[in-house]
């Protein structure tokens, strides 16, 4: 094929494809092997990125080497490294290399994983991997599920199923319940499904930042007396703020008696059930009606890799199945394998491949040990913070997360708030390590999530020493230049 015809066909020669592939693999190996030596955060603002990357739409192509170089130097080098061992902000996304290669294979083979006849092997891998997850979480054999982009879509899909099964689509006077610590994906999902804001009742969390069953019981009794229709309780298997786990077993008892759907957002925390500590904290998880999971969090997959599991796999088809004329010839005897009937997507990636390959290559024991490392790292971080003497532990280590705030020697609460709030910006400017901030009971706190198994004790020690030094510098600055407001 001539160069001009190759261009017209958007194709490369065999030798060119090999050369491109080898270069990409070298880039990835260098990144994975060397990321710990790089800064966690690259402080580039929009104006700088516009100056670097803004250009006219290309009319003619450029050599692939130049495009890859631009990507490596101007895109990768300007991105925060969320899989870095010293990235403790939000929920770190610590992936693994075999899953990266699985994603490469899934993209390269371009398998259409929506209809059984178009990709039976891929459909079977997804069905098998979903069933492995069903077993991990102790759900019955009737359970099933589907891979989606992430926790937001998993929660949205679960709520759509709950609406269909519990309400038969009639949302009038319906109310769902959660704590004030639930992830915002839940309220956004409810809104997208057509519920009014008042139809999601957020209850004040208890002193451990969990959903209070007593408060839930009172709220539901009030709403029923007012003619409303409680239909769903949304619990958390590890909140983003503190790692708190709602009392799942008690909630399951309550929902069974009251005829309510129990959905659990386990986006980051649910895989902790594979550890001894996590299994204790998550007792009752096996009793849920639906469970949202992000495998790209605590199962160490590249993004995107979300999963929704349901106690009865038939509920998905009851909610989403539509058969247009042009797909009638794709019917098969095993319609549960046609994943186009299991959610909102028709065209869908083969996301299950990477998790399947991780289970095959590493085995469940190694993955469980990697999750357990997160618990130990958080405990170590808590001990190191206490030893520094200038930090107040707000919520102790749980589910690999802890929260804390600066405590000046004079006990000045306003000063503590200011230093704690401003510390995040100083960490961003420094770039060596990053922890995020949040608010608990209207007070600013720092927050560390330690679920990356590649974080070493030295990483934790140096990150906490850095925060202590930056906080002391901030205290001096604040005292010398008090705020005018």
Image: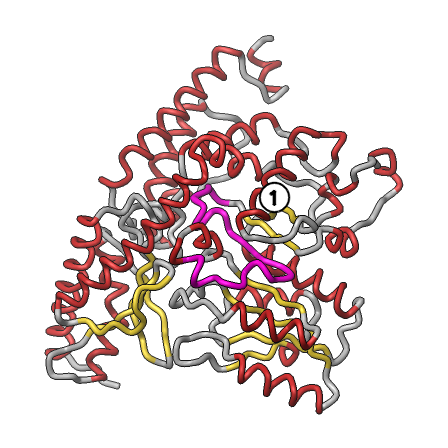
Q: Where 75 falls versus 444 (above or below)?
A: above
Residue at position x 19%, y 80% in the image: 415
How many labels sit on residues?
1
Is 393 on the left or on the right of 164, as rendered?
left
| Magenta residues, start to end | 278-303
In x, y percent, where is residue 27?
36, 28
Viewport quadrant of the C terminus = bottom left
Asked which quadrant contains residue 29, the reply is top left
In x, y percent, where is residue 385?
19, 65
Is 347 on the left or on the right of 65, as rendered?
right
In front here: 364 or 378?
A: 364
Location of mark 1 (residue): 130
Q: Residues within 10 Å of mark 1 (few under 14, many from 20)?
A: many
Asked which quadrant contains residue 155, the reply is bottom right
Find numbered disc 1 in the image and state the secondary structure of the residue it sits on. helix
Viewport quadrant of the N terminus = top right
In x, y percent, where is residue 373?
32, 49
Q: Where 375 falls versus 38 (above or below)?
A: below
Residue at position x 70%, y 62% in the image: 160
Is 159 on the left or on the right of 87, as rendered?
right
Residue at position x 17%, y 68% in the image: 386
Q: How is the image coloured?
A: secondary structure
């Amino acid at each position: 094929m001539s160069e001009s015809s190759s261009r017209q066909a958007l194709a490369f020669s065999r030798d060119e494809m090999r050369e491109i592939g080898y270069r990409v693999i070298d880039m990835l190996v260098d990144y994975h092997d060397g990321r710990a030596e790089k800064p966690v955060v690259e402080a580039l603002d929009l104006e700088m990125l516009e100056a670097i990357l803004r250009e006219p739409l290309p009319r003619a192509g450029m050599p692939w080497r130049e495009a890859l170089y631009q990507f490596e130097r101007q895109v990768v080098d300007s991105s925060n490294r969320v899989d870095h061992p010293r990235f403790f902000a939000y929920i770190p996304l610590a992936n693994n290399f075999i899953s990266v290669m699985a994603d490469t294979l899934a993209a390269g083979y371009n398998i259409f994983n929506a209809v059984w006849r178009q990709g039976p092997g891929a459909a079977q891998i997804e069905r098998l991997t979903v069933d492995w997850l069903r077993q991990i979480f102790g759900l019955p054999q009737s359970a099933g599920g589907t891979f989606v982009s992430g926790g937001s879509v998993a929660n949205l899909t679960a709520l759509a199923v709950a609406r269909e099964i519990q309400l038969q689509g009639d949302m009038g006077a319906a109310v769902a319940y959660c704590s004030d610590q639930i992830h915002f994906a839940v309220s956004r999902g409810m809104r997208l499904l057509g519920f009014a804001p008042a139809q999601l009742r957020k209850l004040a969390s208890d002193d451990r930042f969990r959903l209070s069953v007593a408060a839930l019981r009172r709220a539901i009794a009030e709403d029923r007396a007012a003619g409303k229709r409680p239909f769903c309780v949304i619990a958390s298997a590890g909140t983003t703020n503190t790692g708190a786990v709602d009392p799942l077993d008690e909630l399951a008892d309550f929902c069974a008696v009251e005829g309510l759907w129990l959905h659990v957002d386990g986006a980051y925390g649910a895989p902790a059930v594979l550890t001894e500590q996590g299994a204790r904290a998550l007792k009752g998880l096996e009793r849920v009606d639906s469970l949202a999971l992000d495998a790209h969090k605590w199962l160490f997959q590249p993004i995107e890799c979300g999963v929704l599991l349901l106690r009865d796999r038939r509920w998905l088809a009851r909610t989403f199945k539509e058969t247009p004329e042009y797909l009638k010839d794709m019917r098969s005897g095993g319609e549960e394998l046609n994943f186009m009937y299991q959610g909102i997507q028709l065209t869908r990636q083969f996301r299950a491949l990477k998790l399947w390959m991780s289970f095959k290559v590493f085995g469940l024991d190694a993955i469980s040990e990697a999750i357990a490392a997160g618990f130990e790292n958080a405990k170590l971080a808590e001990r190191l913070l206490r030893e520094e003497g200038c930090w107040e532990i707000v919520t102790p280590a749980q589910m690999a997360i802890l929260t804390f705030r600066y405590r000046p020697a004079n006990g000045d609460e306003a000063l503590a708030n200011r230093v704690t709030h401003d510390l995040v910006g100083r960490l961003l400017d420094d770039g060596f390590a990053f922890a995020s901030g949040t608010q608990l009971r209207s007070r600013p706190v720092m927050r560390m999530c330690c679920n990356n198994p590649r974080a070493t004790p030295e990483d934790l020690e140096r990150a906490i020493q850095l925060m202590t030094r930056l906080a002391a510098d901030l205290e001096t600055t604040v005292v010398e230049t008090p705020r005018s407001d």
